[in-house]
Image (cartoon, rainbow, N blue to C red):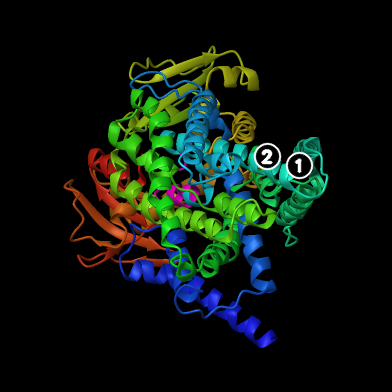
Amino acid sequence: MEHHHMLSLVIIVMTALITPLLVNRLHLNFLPVVVAEILMGILIGKSVLNLVEPNEVLNILSTLGVIFLMFLSGVEIDFSAFKSNKDSKSKSKEPNRLLLTSTIFAAIFLLSLLAAYILKWVGLVDDVFLMVIIISTISLGVVVPTLKEMNLLKTSIGQIILLVAVIADLATMLLLTVYGTLHAKGDSPIWLIGILVVFTAIFYFMGGYFKKSKLIHKLLEGTTQIGIRAVFAMIILLVTLAEGVGAENILGAFLAGVVVSLLGPDKDMIHKLDSFGYGFFIPIFFIMVGVDLNIRELLKDPSILLIIPILFVIFFLTKVIPLSVLMKWYDKKTVLASSFLLTSTLSLVIVSAKLAEQLGTISNTLSGTLILSAIITCVIVPVFFKKLFPVEISEERIINIAFIGKNQLSVPIAQTFNTELYHPTLYYLENNNYKQEITDLDVIEMKEYAPEILEAAGLFDNDIVVCSANDTHINVKVALMAKAHGVERVICRQANAGEDAELQAAGVEIFNEFDSTKTLLKSMIESPNMLSLLSNVESSLYEIEMLNTRYHEMTLREFPFGGNIIFVRILRNNNSIVPHGDTELHFKDRLIVTGSRQYVDQLKRELELF
């Protein structure tokens, strides 16, 4: 028996390894990896080859997969997206995203309620409550990986799609909890779920306290991985508590992810958590979904399969009608593509169908049909989304750069960034000694660099903050404030290396004048022509990260960009590649290019999806 268990585990793990390789090798990049994993599960499972025997070990790993999936979905939420969009290029001022997405979900819920009653009226289903949950839910397990693959998570439309999915998933999880409590044989009061919310708040405040602790900072620098340990402990505690109060374990996992997101973890920790989840646990969950589905059994009663196309139409209509309000800010193609993606349903439908089957409120056949319909939506809608979504929607973004201090260094550097791609702003104190008049830059004068003054001036809303004042203490102070307020990139100018440790721990990039001058002098002695190349605006070297999946595995010979650009090097992982016509571009490649600033900015927009 143990031998069969291990063999099944080996088959699942090998399938998880092979699936992304096959997707890339067969050039099936239009197909999300999670959908490919489900299809591979169907191939090796009960429906086709029947190579895998479900067992306790696989069930545990699959459960950990869905728990980790919901946790990472919570982590992915960017709570700054709840603010109004300040992009001046928008057609009109976008309303508060929380209000907008909540209104969209309210419309989705009302249409789902109407559709559930229609299905009951025509005699296709009996349980209206269950169908409302299934129709109104949206699969974060498909939405998040698809947005992540297309690098859309941080864009305006990406955050709107994510927030609608989050609200839908959270609301339907709560409804499922109520459904399970109402139909359960035991007696677990619904109000006990409030305990879960209380403990979530407690964990948030405890996390904020320990994050400031010197002991925790000391442990973070060692090999104890105290941050990862704390995250796993919180996941287990909230999942256990959720089950203890009669809720679903995925609700506890999702709330744990929300806590981590609110606490603002560093990118290194998020990368490690992504590696744990998407590298092992989550693929096992999706493959097991396909393994457990017995399509041959469902085909014995083909009449019930009529509900699948009807459900797909209902899923789509209940999403596209409420999302039509977005046409005020986005084009028709973008709204249509977003509606298709939000049509996807998976994990919660599976959980709901299995729970209802266990409670005896629906038959085994109907449960399988609902799961199959969810899988079909997951196969179809991400493909439509990728084909329909106009990548150009992401190209309107301007990179806002803030320079602290007005001096002989900051002013000329800021002026070189005054292009179509970048928007520089100078922040400086009153009575500044730099007397040269500035007419081509936005400037903000202030009495002092206090947190409330800087926040009111919009410093922390910039994408990059460059602390370039002549006073090192001011630079360090503002850099740490900017990082504490969640600014993604902060660069700090220093005259010496006295504060490096504190800045590095906070994730601040350091420009050390002494080391930079020493390197510059060495380069001038050894390679005077190279120094001339780097200092020439029209022929300098630039680094661009390839984040547009449209060009993944496209050769440079096929690359359609018409600007005057030369590819000097391609940095891939730890390898440095000399580019040729047959060299392929890969996702996350770092491209070293040279050319005019105008064309470099255009290429940056195209590849980095700004």
- Calculate the distance from the C-alpha at mark 1 to the C-alpha at mark 2: 7 Å
Task: Estimate the x, y position of residue 605 in percent, counting from the top left.
Answer: 31, 41
- Circle 1 sits in a helix, a strand or a loop, which is it? helix
- The image's mark for residue 371 is none
Task: Estimate the x, y position of residue 502 in percent, counting from the top left.
Answer: 68, 43
Quarter residue 210 falls in = top right
Examine the rendering and report whether any part of residue 89 can be seen. Answer: no
Q: Is residue 148 magenta?
A: yes
Instruction: Name the amino acid, label 1.
Output: Gly
Quarter residue 475 falls in = top right
Instruction: Name the amino acid, label 2.
Output: Leu
Q: Residue at x 39, y 49 (%)?
A: 150
Query: On the rendered image, what quadrant is the N terminus found in?
Result: bottom right
Task: Write down the residue under mark 2.
Answer: 263
Position of 374 relative to 495 (above/below) = below
Q: Quick check: marks 1 and 2 in contact, CB under 8 Å?
A: yes
Q: Give the residues in magenta.
A: 143-154
Position of 9 relative to 153 (above/below) = below
Quarter residue 495 falls in = top right
- Circle 2 sits in a helix, a strand or a loop, which is it? helix
Task: Write down the residue under mark 1.
Answer: 207
For this view, does 54 lie left or right of residue 23? right
Position of 165 relative to 530 (above/below) = above
Query: On the rendered image, what quadrant is the C terminus found in?
Result: top left
